[in-house]
Image (cartoon, grey):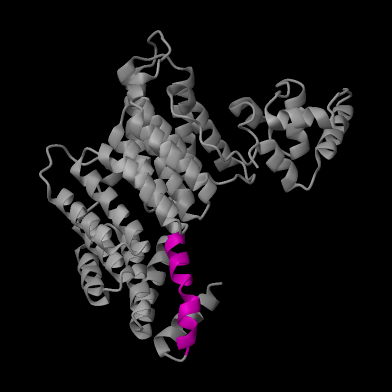
Amino acid sequence: MRHPLAYARNERGWSQEDLARRIRKAAERRGLRSGTTKSRVSKWETGWAAPDAHDSQPLIAEVLGIDYAAVAHLGWPHWLPGQDKPLPLGPHNAVPSLREALMTSLDRRTFLAYTSGALASLAEQWAVTEPGRFPRPSRPYGVDTEMVTYLESAGAELIRLSAGQHRRTRTLLDAHLTTVTDLIDEGRYTRPVEQRLHTLAASLSQTIAWRHFDERRHATAGRFWHAALHNAHTASHRDLGAGVLSDLAYQLLWLKDPKAAVAILDYAIPHTQHPVARSLLHLRQARALAALKENGSCCRALAASEKALEAPMHDPPPAWCSWMSPADLAVDSGRCLAELGQQRQAHRLMAEGITLLPATRPKTTAVFLAYQAETYLRGGEPEMAAETATRSFTLARRLGATRCVTMVRDLEPQLAPYARVPPVAELLEQFHATG
């Protein structure tokens, strides 16, 4: 169902005539008259016509129970739920992509997730289109660079704090991104300032996307990554754009679509410049290839990841992948090998990676322990699996790491047959006690 108005209507079980009648009644309640008919609704849904922004769209918003602020911010038809087609790349869509993402974060409406095919097409467009090919509007200079420096500094601190304090920083991050979006939309600046603002918008959007991903709000996460890609592209920041694409690929892998994840990474990797960024993208490629049981290709991707991580660096790694380390390489390599049936080597690498991980990354430790527990379970070692999962579950609950808690809970059906094994029984009891 391609048009979001048709999606919103069908979601409520309304025919085109039902929607037209409700719009006419909404107009009557306001003391107005509306000539909306089934035929006119059909034209809106096929794109032959658009409802008037001042007359019909407020009535449609009222009927669908949508705040009129969305109409003012996004324009037709982007304020409607169910928009599943990414905006084409270009500076004119950088701000609309941000407005759309922020609206999905604030509004609890149902949005369709972008399809894997649509994301692959967007990745291809990113790979073949240089940002400089897009014309840019001429603006007189006006934005204070001191203000931009402050926004960058505050944004970097919020991104750092959000790693362990999702709940406390969510409102601040959304508000900060809104401020940056308004400045991009309304401000006047030089090209260097424009690049700084779009880079900041991309980094904030990427961080917020991970928050929604952790909460399993995948459609909303996808929209923030979509906005991040637009703004990284407008800023001519290729490594950041490649990183955002790899995040989308990781999400697709999580949603059991490794083939689409590989397709996106195939576009992103050749355009990645920093060796640490290349290492991370190759590692995620290996994870997807392991899920597809492509043993040779997976091992080549792991070797490429290791080689890139060991390459000499002339500049520090980009902030979005600065955490990438030998510990991450070891654990994810182990997970790949476990997927390919090489259990003994997988256990060795995972144990090595968890030992290497610094104490400053407790959330990652919890995730890695969950991976290790899953591997033990796959290898027929329920007692070790339960003991490791308990460590992960306890740490994740203390940190408020929702996604990791869910990962451990997802092991329950596989643990249930071993309910008489004491560590398994204790873990299952914890599951039931904590709801």
Q: Residue at x 38, y 47 (%)?
A: 263
Residue 11 position in % (x across, y down): 72, 47
Left or right: 424 with respect to 67? left
Toward the left, the furthest residue is 312
Taking depth in this image into account, of 264 and 423 the one nearest to the observer is 264
Q: Which portion, as a residue range, is magenta?
A: 400-419
Q: Is residue 409 magenta?
A: yes
Q: Is residue 300 visible?
A: yes
Q: What x and y, as percent, mark residue 251?
A: 43, 52
User: At which x and y percent is residue 50?
Assistant: 70, 24
Q: Is 378 drawn above or below residue 10 in the view shown?
A: below
Q: Quadrant of residue 300?
A: bottom left
Say whether residue 145 is left or right of residue 420.
Answer: left
Write the residue at 30% across / 64% down.
336
Above or below, comparing residue 210 to residue 150 in the picture: below
The residue shown at (44%, 37%) is 122
Q: Is residue 358 visible?
A: no
Q: Is residue 204 magenta?
A: no
Q: Quadrant of the C terminus?
A: bottom right
**Furthest residue in direction top, as rendered:** 140
Give the camera-side residue of 435 and 192: 192
Q: Nearer the viewer, residue 360 or 411?
A: 411
Which quarter of the picture shows residue 273?
top left
Residue at screen point 40% across, 38% down:
123
Decide: is 2 above or below 140.
Answer: below
The secondary structure that dominates the magenta segment is helix
Outermost residue, bottom direction? 420
In the image, taking residue 310 as reference, residue 97 lies left or right, namely right
Q: Position of residue 243 (x, y in %)?
A: 33, 42
Q: How many marks?
A: 0
Which of the two residues, 357 or 345, is positioned nearer the viewer here?
345
Quadrant showing the N terminus: top right
